[in-house]
């Protein structure tokens, strides 16, 4: 079942979300329209990894047998470093299960510092610090496709590190040189269960168009989504619009009733309060923790006529002060055990060897639920400014209709 009645078996009750604003000046957002395969091999987790591994001079840390024989040199170098500094758009409660699992494997790693910045601010802080000296960032995670494209292609700021997991990954596991996929998070429909009757609750964008079109007075200014002026929301909207053949038949009905917000936090607040009845293209990392709460009135569904899958990216800056420990973290997050920890942090893993018992919500299980042909990967292929401007113009015109 795709609805919140199942609550997706989330592993923990998370605190209130932070109201992050995903702002971005330019809009050269990325779009990858084909559904991709999922990971097929075990990774670099600890002793519970499905494949056999060998122990090196790593304080008990066990590596899969396919890791290079000189991987112990990274481990030895890590032992000489002090902690790890991570710049991300993730809250402390998202990171905690990951940090706990990582430290259980690499016990000598000291303090791991994380922050919860806006998606674009992850990069802006790095550039600002680098311009005036050296950035403290050794590891970066963000869901801003445009900023990743600039970081990799324009600034050439990512370390040239080939993870031993690379050959095990699908194409979307490393979409750009030095850039790896952290998680593949579904984008959802959400609604107020107290105000939207069960037989009205949309399971697709086409359902939403029929619902809104059937009672325009009731839904006027009662529908919400991301503002197209930020790159996170624009990437989702643009990719879905390109992939779904009847996109504008749907959007022409839904957009006139829509009020836009800069992030999912305010959308969820206002759906809960009844100011909005329905939201679309909403981030699962905000919706699901709220929907999981006991007595929550927030309901949700995957988007049956095309569920966007937002690829949250991660990379090591080539100026990383804790380079070796950052490599250990990257490889861990790509591993079987790391992907389970990612799930426990509220995100969506994509390894094929992560079972449904370990992570009920994964790229694989969502693909089985909605059909892999209905997964729309929001990734890092650049579009022209002219195409972006044309889409935004059409979007704005539909809203004014």
Image (cartoon, helix red, strand yellow):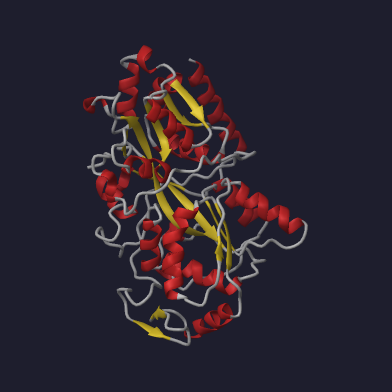
Number of numbered discs: 0
Give the residue at x 21% y 26%.
199
Quadrant including the N terminus: top left
> Residue 271, image x and y in percent?
39, 29
Please indicate whether residue 62 sits to the left or right of residue 327 in the image. Answer: left
Please indicate whether residue 20 sits to the left or right of residue 278 in the image. Answer: right
Give the residue at x 38% y 25%.
250
Name the residue at the bottom extreme: 57
Give the residue at x 52% y 20%.
397
> Residue 164, image x and y in percent?
46, 73
Res. 384 image quadrant: top right
7 w.r.t. 245: above or below: below
Res. 305 image quadrant: top left
Res. 295 image quadrant: top left
> Residue 35, image x and y in percent?
37, 49
88 w.r.t. 246: above or below: below
Give the residue at x 46% y 71%.
103
Please indicate whether residue 315 sits to the left or right of residue 100 in the image. Answer: right
Please indicate whether residue 147 sits to the left or right of residue 378 in the image. Answer: right
Name the residue at the right extreme: 132
Q: Nearer the viewer, residue 304 or 187?
A: 187
> Residue 260, image x and y in percent?
50, 27
Name the residue at the top extreme: 217
394 w.r.t. 342: above or below: above
Q: Nearer the viewer, residue 166 or 276?
A: 276
């Amino acid at each position: 079942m795709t609805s919140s009645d199942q609550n997706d078996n989330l592993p923990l009750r998370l605190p209130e979300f932070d109201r992050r604003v995903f702002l971005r000046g330019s809009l050269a957002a990325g779009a990858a329209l084909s559904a991709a395969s999922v990971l097929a091999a075990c990774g670099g987790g600890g002793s519970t990894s499905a494949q056999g591994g060998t122990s090196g001079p790593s304080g008990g840390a066990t590596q899969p047998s396919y890791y290079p024989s000189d991987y112990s040199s990274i481990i030895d170098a890590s032992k000489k470093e002090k902690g790890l500094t991570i710049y991300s758009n993730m809250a402390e409660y998202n990171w905690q299960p990951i940090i706990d699992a990582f430290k259980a494997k690499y016990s000598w790693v000291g303090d791991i510092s994380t922050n919860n910045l806006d998606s674009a601010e992850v990069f802006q802080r790095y550039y600002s610090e680098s311009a005036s000296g050296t950035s403290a960032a050794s590891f970066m995670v963000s869901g801003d496709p445009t900023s990743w494209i600039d970081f990799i292609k324009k600034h050439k700021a990512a370390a040239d590190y080939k993870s031993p997991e690379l050959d095990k990954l699908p194409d979307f596991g490393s979409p750009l040189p030095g850039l790896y996929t952290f998680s593949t998070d579904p984008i959802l429909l959400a609604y107020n269960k107290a105000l939207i009757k069960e037989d009205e609750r949309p399971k697709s964008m086409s359902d939403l168009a029929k619902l809104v079109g059937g009672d325009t007075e009731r839904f006027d200014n009662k529908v919400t989504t991301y503002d197209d002026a930020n790159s996170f929301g624009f990437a989702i909207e643009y990719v879905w619009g390109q992939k779904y053949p009847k996109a504008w038949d749907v959007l022409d009905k839904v957009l006139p009733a829509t009020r836009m917000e800069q992030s999912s936090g305010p959308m969820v607040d206002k759906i809960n309060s009844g100011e909005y009845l329905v939201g679309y293209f909403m981030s699962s990392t905000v919706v699901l923790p709220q929907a999981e709460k006991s007595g929550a009135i927030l309901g949700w569904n995957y988007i049956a006529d095309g569920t966007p899958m937002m690829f949250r990216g991660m990379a090591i800056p080539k100026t990383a002060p804790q380079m070796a420990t950052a490599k250990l973290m990257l490889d861990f997050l790509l591993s079987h055990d790391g992907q389970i920890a990612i799930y426990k942090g509220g995100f969506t893993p994509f390894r094929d060897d992560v079972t449904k018992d370990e992570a009920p919500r994964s790229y694989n299980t969502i693909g089985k639920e909605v059909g892999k042909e209905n997964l729309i990967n929001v990734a890092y292929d650049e579009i022209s400014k002219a195409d972006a401007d044309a889409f935004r113009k059409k979007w704005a015109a539909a809203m004014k209709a």
